[in-house]
Image: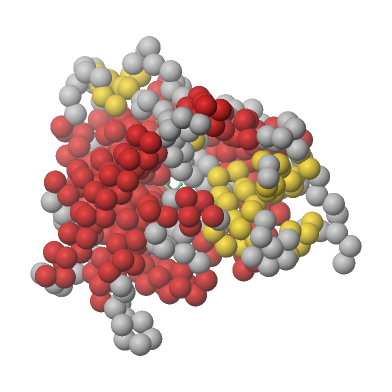
Amino acid sequence: MPTTPIPQSLGLPKIGHMLGLTIDPMAVMQRLHRQFPHIVEVAVPPHTFFVVTNPTLIEEVLVTKQKHFHKDGFLKHHASALFGNGLLSSDGDFWLRQRRMAQPAFHRQRITEYSEIISAKTAETLAALPHNQPIDILATMMELTLTIVAETLFGVITPRQLITIGQALQQSMDYFTNDPLRDIAASITRLPLHDAKNAAYATAIQALDTVINEIITERIAQPRESTDLLGMFLSARDDDDQPMSRSQLRDECKTLFLAGHETTALTLTWSIWLLLRHPDCVRTLQAELTQVIGDRLPTMADMPNLVYTEQVIREAMRLYPPAYTIARSCIADVTIGDYAIPAGKDVTLSQYAMHRDPRWYDQPDAFIPSRWSEEFKAQLPKYAYFPFGGGPRLCIGQQFALVEATLILAMVMRHGDWQLLPWQRVVPAPAITLRPKRGVMVQIHDRA
Ligand code: HEM
């Protein structure tokens, strides 16, 4: 079948789009979406990769032709110390077996059980926050969601272990945050400007591996009747009746700690920041919370009635998708639409650019939670909004994350009158996830 040539965007001579993608990758992706409505080949010499800018073609990559695509080299090689061969980065039959093993921990019944832990931990966190003093809400949400994932998926672990994991994950993520000036200076001067950064990363990974090994050793030494995820991984046997290897166990635990807390904390942080900049939205939200939950703790049963709360979260994930890009490597020649993708090429999908694309969203940069009416959702092309990815590699924690974000946001906004500290500039920093560079500073005032 004849194929349509893929348009190219070559950028500057010799460096292609390298500078733009280093300094402001989100702006480059948005520009490509506006110029090329389907797909474009982008140059970063000596390589090129494809950016898919059309929801129907994205569906082919993630769903209908997903067998032709594997996870990309970044996760497998660049970030391999962090994710190893865990669920996020593995592929093929091996991934499928691990995914099936983990799936029961995310069933609805389990999430209902987790929701009680979520409310209890949130109540404890909120009660301990000082009033009338600056609070970094990003740090607060990171700590809370880490505690929740530790307790729900791994059983209770000690406060020291939790602090070590939190710090090591934070340092590892810092490693992947762009520092364009340093990167450019290092490549021009060839000075070892990254040495300190590399050393800090290696130390963080070592601390993480040590504490996770310790958690696994303790659990093996003191087996208990437990249906949490770690217990399930420990009792799993392959076709030859062999248990999961120690290094595989460690990779799965690291992956779930990271994937299971950072993205939800970011969703909450962006939601709170956006809300506090829109007092009218806070009023609408408060009216819903007063009516649905009043002064009691919210539960899973309230979820269908927390319609506006859910719209706030959905809109925050549209504007600031914590997982802002998905990459795949094509493993066998394939056509998507009528474009030929050769084996060996990388393909990038940008949630950030798609979610702000004026083809699908009016006032694409504005925070308008009420846009998410049932009619709007019904007419939106499926992959014009994909904060959790799609197809077989859809986020395993999607339901968990949505319940957690909804319950926590409801409790936070019932807790007091929150205000943003006025002097700050909140800047999105694209690393592995999309986080506010210096956090978000807020203050709680006693409710009048
Ligand atoms: C708002 C919160 C979250 C967002 C936005 C998010 C986003 C994503 C996305 C986009 C993917 C697909 C990546 C790809 O296709 O390359 C993914 C995969 C994954 N997520 Fe999440 N996630 C969230 C919360 C969670 C939670 C709470 C957990 C676990 C407790 C989790 C665990 C995972 C795992 C293990 C995978 C890999 C699944 C597989 O490939 O089988 N995520 N997530």
Q: Quadrant of residue 25?
A: top right
Quarter of the rendering containing residue 408:
top left
User: What's the colour scheme?
Assistant: secondary structure
Q: Position of residue 165 (x, y in %)?
A: 24, 47
| Quarter placement of the C terminus | top left
In the image, is 336 to the left or to the right of 112?
Answer: right
Quarter of the rendering containing residue 264: top left
Outermost residue, top side: 423
The foreground one among 392 and 446 is 392
Nearer to me, 271 or 3:
3
Task: State the residue lying farthest toward the bottom.
Answer: 240
Give residue 247's position: percent from left, percent from top: 31, 66
Spot the residue most to the right: 2
Q: Residue placed farthest to the front in the image?
A: 190
Q: Residue at x 62, y 30 (%)?
A: 19
Tell me the residue at 63%/41% (across/down).
354
Relative to 79, say whether 296 is above or below: above
Residue 126 in the image, given as x and y percentages of width and height? 21, 34
Q: Is residue 437 visible?
A: yes
Compare residues 367 and 386 and report the one nearer the observer: 386
Task: State whether residue 344 is above or below residue 246.
Answer: above
Does residue 34 appear in the picture of this structure? no
Q: Quadrant of the N terminus?
A: bottom right
Question: Relative to 62, is 7 above or below?
Answer: above
Task: Say which residue appears at 32% left-offset and 46% top-offset.
Answer: 202
Total of numbered circles in the picture? 0
In the picture provided, is 218 more to the left or to the right than 420? Answer: left
Q: Position of residue 322 (x, y in %)?
A: 46, 41
> Residue at 16% of width from left, 70% of height from top?
220
